[in-house]
Amino acid sequence: MPEHLYIAEKPSLAEALAKARASILGVKAQKGQGAWTVGNDAVTWLFGHMYELANPDDYDASLKQWKMEHLPIIPDKWRRSPHKDKAAHLRIIKDLLKNSKYVVNAGDAEREGQLLVDELLEEMGWDPFSPKTKRVWVSSMAEKDVVKAINDQFPNVEKRNLSIAAVLRQRADWLHGLNLTRMYTILARNSGANMLISVGRVQTPTLKLVVDRDREIESFKPVDHYLPSGIFKHENGSFRADYIIPDDCEGLDSEGRLTDKKVADAIGLKISGKTGKITEFSTAVKSKAPPLPYSLSALQAECSSKLSLTAQETLEVAQSLYETHKATTYPRSDSRYLPRTILNDEAPGIMAALASTPGLDAAAQKADLKLRSKAWDDSKVTDHHGIIPTSEFSAAKLAKMSPMERKVFELIAKAFIAQFHPEQTWKSVTAKLNVEGENFKATGRIPIANGWRVVYGAEADDDDEDEKESDQNLPTMSKGDPVLAEKGDVTAKRTTPPPYFNDGTLIAAMTNVHKFVTDPEVKKRLRENDGLGTEATRANIIETLLKRKFLERKGKTKLVSTKEGRSVIDALDNDVTSPGLTAIWEAQLQKISRGEASETQFTEILLKSLRSMIEKGKGKTVTIKGASIEPLPGHGETCPKCGVGKMVTRMLNKGEHKGKKFLVCDAYNKDDPNSCRHAVWPNSPKKDVKPIEGHGETCPQCGKGKLLTREVQKGEHKGKKFLSCDAWSKDDPNSCNFSKWPEVKVTPLEGHGSTCIKCNKGTMVTRMINKGDNKGKTFLSCNAYPECNNAIFPDNLKSGKSSKFSKGSGKMSFGKKPFKK
């Protein structure tokens, strides 16, 4: 009987917990079937979500069909279903749970990790918030940190609000995604578009970001504009200055750009050779702090830019550095700040290890551990801190990493080392001057100290958008000093379209989606809530859009929208594609996780919004470019066969009749053989086939369908008629496949109706040859075929096949009759 049962989110964390617990107890951890044994304790693991929210048809079988009248689907009492492929492991956990005194939730230290274990406990009848349930919060897989997490475990009830927020997020996404996906898919199918219109709270606004960007690029018209400038001479040296374009300048466009080259050239000519004076001269010492440690989103953006990794690839590498190598801290962090406790407890050891690591040693050896960058801020640390090396890292671990793991680790390590280097400093110089009534401005930048930039060496990019000084060394000047315009010239410029998204820039756009929103209130909420999705889900959202073929890659990381993706966005209402819904949800969920808002309030807002969207959408007409088709006469009318469904227009997508339209009852369900299969093919040259005997009779095989006259459309039997059951469906292998061909009347041969002497069971019947040289000739064969293959061919067959040929008895002559009278 386990004293404590630790339930980890994944096997790697279970192993780390088992070994850390063994270290605490002074025993050896033993791995068994589905669990580790550690003294009187046990450690088991999950494989992600072991349960999922039940499907609509688990509540009501009729909901398997997608019908508008079913919407919105809102369960009265929520159910979960176990993942079928995880049943065996669930049985192991259930047996362990029966005999455990205490349970420790060891899900990942985040909202979803909290839910994974709590929902399992609920389904197995264990109260996750009872005094017998504890919580460990692991942010580093280093053994020392896992030991500390175990020793610092706390009652799981302290995370109850976080668990409630996770459950509400899960249910809300189910309600929103399932109902709107069904509604818009039904509307699209009503227009003849046979495609899934997948809707998701995060997925759909993310897709819209890409669609909008692609269309902006496609509609972009470059604008040529001009900037007059000049080379000016001061007694202390020469320098370049650019024209300050006044608001009332001739030749400006609506964006304030000078687009008239003649005006620009005139300014250059006007000042050439003329004397002016300095109107303003100033200097200021400026500095730049080191970049903060990485959150997952920041790391994904950096790896996309510098290493051409996709967001998912970056996550996988970061997860490997955390789990396999135990070289970095928890990767799915949304914070770029660090707790001050790391300064004294861990920073010296981490820096010592980095100082012994080739490639990092020089910068680490020069680090000053007394420095305090702005990254050290407890108030800005969330459930996790920025991603940094662990105290277990060593040069030996680096040697075991793959080349790409090493590159990503070095990015993380350099960001950490930079926190212990001084700020970069430089002298910023600005001069303004006036010549012939025209104003110009020059900037210069004089380096003072590289500071933290030495950590990055030649890699360092000065990408600070706030600093636009040129690198020229401006001479020292004073206000009123004379200057000579030695030369006036004009720089031609052309506007460029925004770049296509790649994994890194799309992740950045999702994180900072407030920049793409105009509504002030929504913008404010999105800024506060870190945008679309979470650190743990953004990469998966991109992969989902790619899998559904709404996005595609051009090259390794460039992302563009597909025709299908654009069609989805065009079909949806603005309130579905806007990130505003996420802003409202996340604001409420964060309040719930802090105990500042109620579950009921969130649910009421959600259901009100959902019902409004469904009601508004039911009357819409959705047209999908390239997929929707013009409805046929009779479209929308009640099905004449079942009287329940509506006739809708469909089009064949393949085969020789590709592109042909027809009407079909929308009550048809390929999974239900009893559903209505009524279809009408307009303008079909074969629709008026003259019925043959038996047409309209009840099918003798299934007893439900009716026999209808069909005509063979191609092949050697083209034009021949036969009967078949109208309950047959090519999409349903279990549907009735009865068919009947009219009997060909032939004159019976001698022996017709006699007992077969070969099998003594069948009866010999007269048959007719349908092809070849002997077409139309008759022979006898056993009607027990294929069990019995006895056949008798008379001697009047044409040569080419001997008349003595036999498939059965070998006796072709009627002298000795191989049958009984």
Image (cartoon, helix red, strand yellow):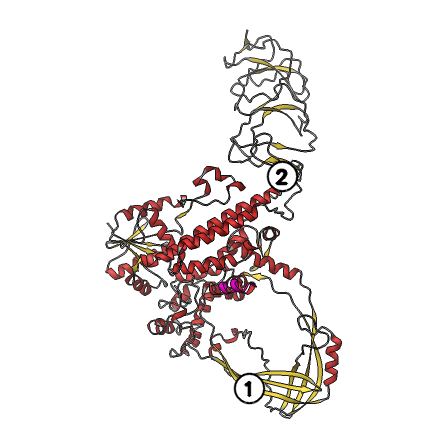
Secondary structure of the residue carrying tag 2 is strand
State how far apart marks 1 and 2 are (Cα).
Answer: 73 Å
Residue located 48% across and 61% down the image: 314
Seen from the viewer's position, the closer of residues 694 and 401 is 694
Q: Amino acid at mark 1?
A: Thr
Query: Where does label 2 land, which residue?
Result: 650
Q: Is residue 338 left or right of residue 281?
A: left
In the rendered image, residue 207 lying in the magenta stretch gets the answer no
Seen from the viewer's position, the closer of residues 451 and 807 is 451
Q: Amino acid at mark 2?
A: Arg
| Quadrant position of the C terminus in the picture | top right
- Residue at the far top: name it: 821
| Residue 204 % position (x, y) | 54, 54
Seen from the viewer's position, the closer of residues 528 and 225 is 528
Q: Is residue 331 visible?
A: yes
Secondary structure of the residue carrying tag 1 is strand
Residue 754 lies, with reference to residue 255, above or below; the image says above
Q: Quadrant of residue 253?
A: bottom right
* Majority secondary structure of magenta residues: helix
Q: Is residue 312 visible?
A: no
Residue 762 lies, with reference to residue 630, above or below; the image says above
Q: Are marks 1 and 2 in contact (CB under 8 Å)?
A: no
Query: Where does label 1 land, which residue?
Result: 283
Q: Which residues are magenta?
A: 517-526
Query: Counting other residues with Cα less than 10 Å from the Cα at mark 2, is it few (<14), some (14-19), or many (20 or more)?
Result: many
Residue 311 lies, with reference to residue 622, above or below; the image says below
Query: Counting other residues with Cα less than 10 Å from the Cα at mark 1, is it few (<14), some (14-19), or many (20 or more)?
Result: some
